[in-house]
Image: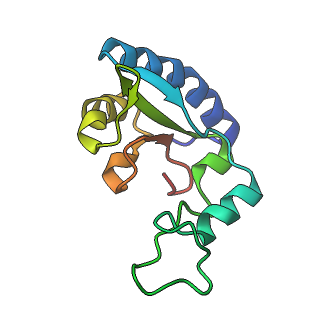
């Protein structure tokens, strides 16, 4: 599918309400996290550790540096959303809770990508320029 960025953003806007409706159909309440990410946030995500919240420079040796995200995320392009699924008012953080919704999302369009395939289960996006 050869769509420009504008057409992909329109497609994503069409698919997003369907994703939310499917999450509700599966019995979840949904909290919407990040959708569009600015340049400063992308830079911070790429240079700060999700484990200790410290920056990559001068990082401790007690664990491997794991960034919050990447500089060139499709969030920068408006092609991704982070969802937090909830049951009984409690957020679900395990990947298993997202499995069926992720599998459903991947069937909606050939460009749909689910973050559970790369250790980010709450991430739902459209692929753009090889990024997901």
Towards the viewer: 62 or 50: 62
Whether residue 74 is situated above or below residue 72 in the rendered picture: above
Residue 62: % across, % down: 40, 83
Q: Residue at x 55, y 43 (%)?
A: 2
Q: Residue at x 64, y 34 (%)?
A: 9
Towards the viewer: 42 or 76: 42
- How many numbered discs, if any? 0
Q: Residue at x 59, y 72 (%)?
A: 54
Residue 50: % across, % down: 50, 63
Towards the viewer: 107 or 83: 83
Asked where in the image residue 99 lies, by quadrant, the reply is top left
Residue 80 placement, left or right of 124: right
Please name the colour scheme applied to the rendered image.
rainbow
Residue 21: % across, % down: 43, 14
Q: Residue at x 51, y 56 (%)?
A: 131
Whether residue 43 is situated above or below residue 97 in the rendered picture: below
Residue 3: % across, % down: 59, 40
Asked where in the image residue 79 lies, by quadrant, the reply is top right
């Amino acid at each position: 599918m050869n769509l420009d960025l504008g057409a992909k953003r329109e497609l994503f806007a069409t698919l997003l309400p369907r994703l939310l409706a499917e999450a509700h159909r599966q019995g979840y309440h949904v909290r919407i996290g990040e959708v569009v990410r600015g340049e400063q946030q992308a830079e911070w995500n790429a240079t700060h550790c999700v484990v200790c919240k410290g920056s990559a420079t001068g990082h401790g040796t007690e664990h491997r540096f794991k960034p919050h995200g990447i500089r060139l995320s499709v969030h920068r392009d408006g092609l991704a959303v982070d969802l937090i699924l909830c049951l009984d008012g409690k957020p679900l953080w395990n990947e298993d809770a997202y499995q069926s919704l992720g599998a459903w999302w991947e069937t909606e369009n050939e460009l749909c990508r689910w973050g559970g395939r790369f250790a980010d289960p709450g991430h739902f996006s459209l692929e753009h320029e090889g990024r997901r």
